[in-house]
Image (cartoon, rainbow, N blue to C red):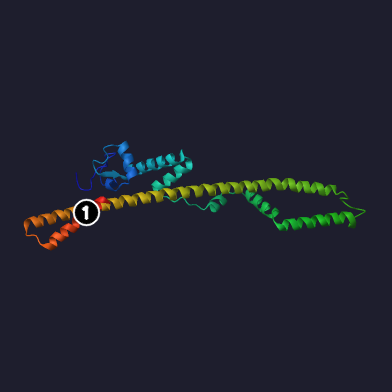
Amino acid sequence: MKPGQETCGVCGRHGSAVRLYSTAWLRPTVAQWLDREYPGWRDTGWLCIEDLQRARRHVLEETIIKERGELTALDSTVVTSLIQDETLSVDIERDYEEKVSLAERSADAVAAYVGSWQFIFTFIAVLIVWMSANAWLLRTDAFDPYPFILLNLFLSLVAAIQAPLIMMSQRRQETKDRLRSQNDYQVNLKAELEIRHLHEKLDHHLLRQWERLTEIQEMQMELIDDTVAVGPSDPATAKRRSRLKRQSAARRAD
C-alpha cells in the first residue's frame, strides 16, 4: 500500500479522498464504543472522519439517554450541531419578528397602548366629558341621559374588543418565551457536553504525553547502560543514570 493510502479500521475504505484520523488520539469513551461495536477497528490504526462522527454521535446520544432517560428532538439538534461544528445561538427576536403578520403586529400595538398610563388618562377624560355633557351641558337634548346606557354599551364593546387583542399579544409573547427557553436549553446542553469532552480530551492527551516521556526516558537509560557496558564508568555517568532511574520510577508511580 502506498504512503498516504492508510485504511479505515471500520469501513475498510482507503485512498487520498478519504479523510483519516489516527486511532491513537481518540477519546476513551469513543474508543470504548468502537471496541464494543467493531472489535477489530484498531488493526489498521486509522479511522475515517465519517465513522468517527458516527461514533461520536452514538456516544453523545448514549450519554444524554443515560443522564436524562430519553433523547428529545432538542437533544438531537444539539448532538447534530456538535458533530457538524455548527452554532446553536440564534437571535430569537429577529427570527420571530420576520414571521409576524400585520394582524399580530396590530394586536401588539393595541395591547401596548391599552396597558399604558396614556390610555388610562385618555379613557378617564373621555368618561368625564361624556358624563358632564349629558348631565349638565345637554340636559334638555342629551344623547345619553342618566344612567348613561349608551356609555355602558360603549364600555362593554371596548372591553369585548380589548380582551381578544390582549390574549393574542400574550400568546405571541408566550411563544417567543418558549422559543427563547428552548434555545437557551440547547446552548447550555451543548456547552456542558463540550466542556466535559474537552476535559476528557485533555486528560487523554496528558496521559499519552506521560507515556511518551516514560518511553523516551527508558530509551535514554538503555543508551546509558550500553555506554557503561562499552566504556569505563565515571561518577558523573553513574549519578545521571541513578537520577534517570528515580525519575522513571516516580512517573510509573504517578
Give the camera-side residue of 146 and 33: 33
Give the camera-side residue of 80 and 60: 60
Q: Is residue 1 above or below residue 240?
A: above
Q: Position of residue 91 (x, y in %)?
A: 52, 53
Q: Is residue 254 left or right of residue 87?
A: left
Tally the marks: 1
**Which residue does the numbered mark 1 point to in the structure image?**
248
Q: Is residue 138 above or below residue 54?
A: below
In the image as oriented, which residue stretches furthest toward the left?
231
Q: Is residue 127 above or below residue 68?
A: below
Q: Which residue is drawn at the image coordinates 71% and 58% (left, top)?
A: 117
Q: Is residue 208 left or right of residue 186?
A: left
Which quadrant: the N terminus? Answer: top left
The quadrant holding residue 225 is bottom left
The quadrant holding residue 160 is top right
Q: Which residue is drawn at the image coordinates 18% and 53% (left, top)?
A: 218
- Label 1 element class: helix
Q: Position of residue 24 (x, y in %)?
A: 27, 47
Q: Position of residue 201 (x, y in %)?
A: 34, 50
Q: Which residue is drawn at the image coordinates 74% and 47% (left, top)?
A: 159
